[in-house]
Amino acid sequence: MAVVMDALYDQDLKSTLEVWQQSAGRRVIMAYDPDGWRFAVILVEADSNEPIEAITGDLGALSKELLFAWISAPRASVLAHLELLESAVQPIVSMDVTAFAQGALESSPVRATKTALRKFVRTRESLLVDVKRPNLPEPVVNWVYARSGGICEFEGCDKELFKDSRDHYGYYGYLAHIVAAKPKGPRGDDKLSISLAIAPANIMLCCDVHHRLIDKVEPDSYPRERLDAMVATRISWRANQAKTLSYPIVHALAFIGDIAGRATGFSQHDARKALFEGQLMPAGERVAEYLLRDSQGGNDVDDPGYWAAFIRTFQTQIRLIYETVRGHGAFGTQAEQLAIFPLGNMPAMLLGGWLISEARKIELFSFRRSAGTWVRPQELNPLVTFTWSKPAEKIAVGAKVLITLEITAEVTDAALNEELLSMPRIRITPSVQGVDVVAPAQAMERYRAACQEAWAYVVDDLKASEVSICAIASAAAVFAFGMKLQSRLHPPIHMYQMARQKPPFLAFSLDRHRIIGPHEPPNNVLVLDAC
């Protein structure tokens, strides 16, 4: 069985040694190098002479006191006696020390004496005094604190070191050398220790815990290369944070709804990451605010009754979106640019796009289900292109027209009812169908251009009297198409729900400044303005 070294602080080191000295049938060997820097205490099974555990760490006042008391204790008061071994082979901290432990057993350790232990402790303490770094010039101290933003530079640590717990400002961190200022110190070098003693690049700002960890408790686990990498990561992070100050501020909106009767989750953290990747800055700490979201969730959107109540349920939010996006409310005035995160059922996504329209610059993100993220991927190779098709037959001006968005899969004739099949049909399709084909930013722009062309043909050339829409597409694709349907300049639009195992049914209609539900008037109409 492998023996792995565990590095402990003084209090934990003492506690473990207290347990070991009362372990029946065990031997305890303390091995150390002649310079007094590294040491390891090994617990051994007496009968089989097999090493069981090994520890090292911060040999402080508590653990030293215990060791001297252990040596002086009467034989009857302890079950395991302490043995000492001065070893030229140094143990490697926090790594597999099986071979070292077995070598220590073969080197015939001897019963510990106060004289031998005192010599080791004195040698170690004189070494620790000798490796103390020189005072750093004030410009170096300031530079390191500025570089780190006053935060511990150890990986994963966010401790602020420019103030104490009572908000008293000052320098409360430790300026740890990566290459020790003295050759015998942690990661010391005969030549580099002198040349890098006051070099800012060789100084790492640490909190107390991580300063002790890399210099006293586990120096061998943190070689120069690893600590250099930590500092480089923090420098890169700070540079990226500064770069975000030049990003345009966007107000992010999340249109989140039930999908297949299941409530949809949304990660604010991932949305922030997606914005930063797109070189955008969220307007507030809460990245996105929710819209058209049913707080209860679990509704069956394939039930016509859900859509019969939809307009009434969400009328307050619908009015809010309609008014504020025109500059009369919070997200209409705080940011010139909007970022949209759509993830929900098709009719609600089309409505959301119709309400937002294209009155300002909008960044539209598509959720990638396979990766579970809003962060945009790189362009696919080969590039996905988008086309729209005109009906083969001649269409009379003013006809009723069907548009199908077939981005994820084909909308077959079998999936449509007789009324929809009777209409001239315009298909918008990608060169390769899939759930993530509009996720790359450039692909989304090509898709939106195809939607613009198709919609212009329907409205300007055909002068369609009514337009029905059916979609098998990602939420972002449907939302993007909805943005093309400018709320005032279009014929009546009928959005259908593509239900599972049943024909599509009308969810609602959009008639310029009105939203019309599928149930009987007068409660089925929401008028957005009187114009």
Image: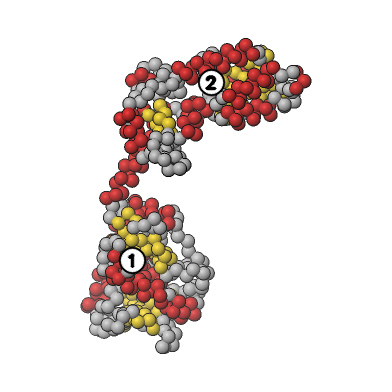
Left or right, residue 117 beside residue 446:
right
Q: Nearer the viewer, residue 438 or 48?
A: 48
Question: In which quadrant is the N terminus drawn?
Answer: top right
Farthest residue, direction top = 115
Q: Nearer the viewer, residue 323 or 419?
A: 323
Identify whether 456 is placed above or below 382: below
Q: Nearer the viewer, residue 396 or 520?
A: 520
Q: Which label's residue is closer to the chain start, 1 or 2?
A: 2
Whole-percent x, y for residue 301 in the image: 48, 73
Whole-percent x, y for residue 194 in the image: 36, 18
| Label 1 Cα neighbours within 10 Å, binned few <14 / some 14-19 / many ≥20 | few
Residue ID at (40%, 26%): 177
Residue ID at (40%, 79%): 508
Label of residue 330 in the image? 1
Q: Quadrant of residue 185?
A: top left
Residue ID at (35%, 31%): 141
